[in-house]
Image (cartoon, rainbow, N blue to C red):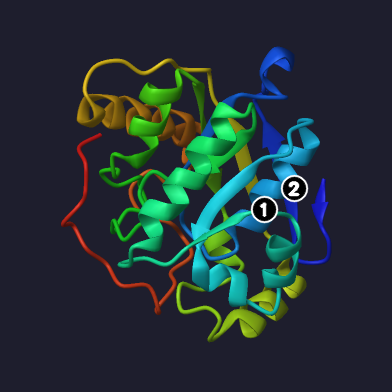
Amino acid sequence: MALVPFARLRVSGDVPVPLRGGPLILAANHISPIDPAVLMAACRARGVAPRFLADAAVFRLRSVGWLVRRTGHVPVARGTATVTDALGDAAAAVEAGAVVLVYPEGRIGLDPGFWPEKGKTGTARLALLSGAVVIPVAQWGTHELVPYSAPKGAVRGLLRAMRHRPTVHVRFGAPLRVTGTAREATEQIMAAITATLAPLRAAEPDRPNHVDPTRPLSTSRTRPR
């Protein structure tokens, strides 16, 4: 499948048919501002139409902002009270039988190796309260399309991608029912995302080949693998 004209999209794994209409939580790693657009395309390929929570900055991007605004998704302004409001909106959607896509890390990850960081507990609390199944979703390659600094540099990144057409991978993992405390359930989710991601980057296990100079690095939330 092509993310015309920027990249080739390869989708693996599946969403079981009984879960496609919800209630369901999709929990994904987050490595680029363009992740929501890529995940929408991957979900469409699997017959799933999720609502998702994403950084409010994504909604301002010229390249994809118009699309995420039109399709009923939920912006999250990091560091403000709207984070709590957004989780409330997500809970209401799940309880109504929707499919909701969430980034448990709560931000684009800053781990130097691009592996999933320690997650926030919001996704786990959502799953524990609703009883909904969680499917881990891993993606790899979106960091080659749009830089961390977007919207600054986004157009330049997409023009470069048009020349090289990198392959972007999205993989749906095995359904998971979380248990225990919110922190324990969060670690279950992050471990599942990490395990789902590993085959996609087998040739780049330690650090990605593509380096984004605008992306800060931090080990403050690095989790052991």
The quarter in which the N terminus is drawn is top right
Residue 89 seen anywhere in this rendered image of the structure: yes
Amino acid of disc 2: Ala
Quick one: which residue is furthest to the left in this view? 220
Q: Quadrant of residue 126?
A: top left
Residue 61 disc label? none
- Does the residue at mark 1 contact the one at mark 2 (Cβ under 8 Å)? yes
Residue drawn 82% across and 52% down?
2
Q: Secondary structure at mark 1?
A: helix
Residue drawn 43% across and 46% down?
87
Q: Quadrant of residue 119?
A: top left
Name above or below for residue 44 compared with residue 76: above
Mark 2: few/some/many CA within 10 Å (<14, 14-19, 20+): some
Task: Name the residue carrying label 2.
Answer: 41
Task: Name the residue carrying label 1.
Answer: 38
Asked whether 82 or 187 is in front, the reply is: 82
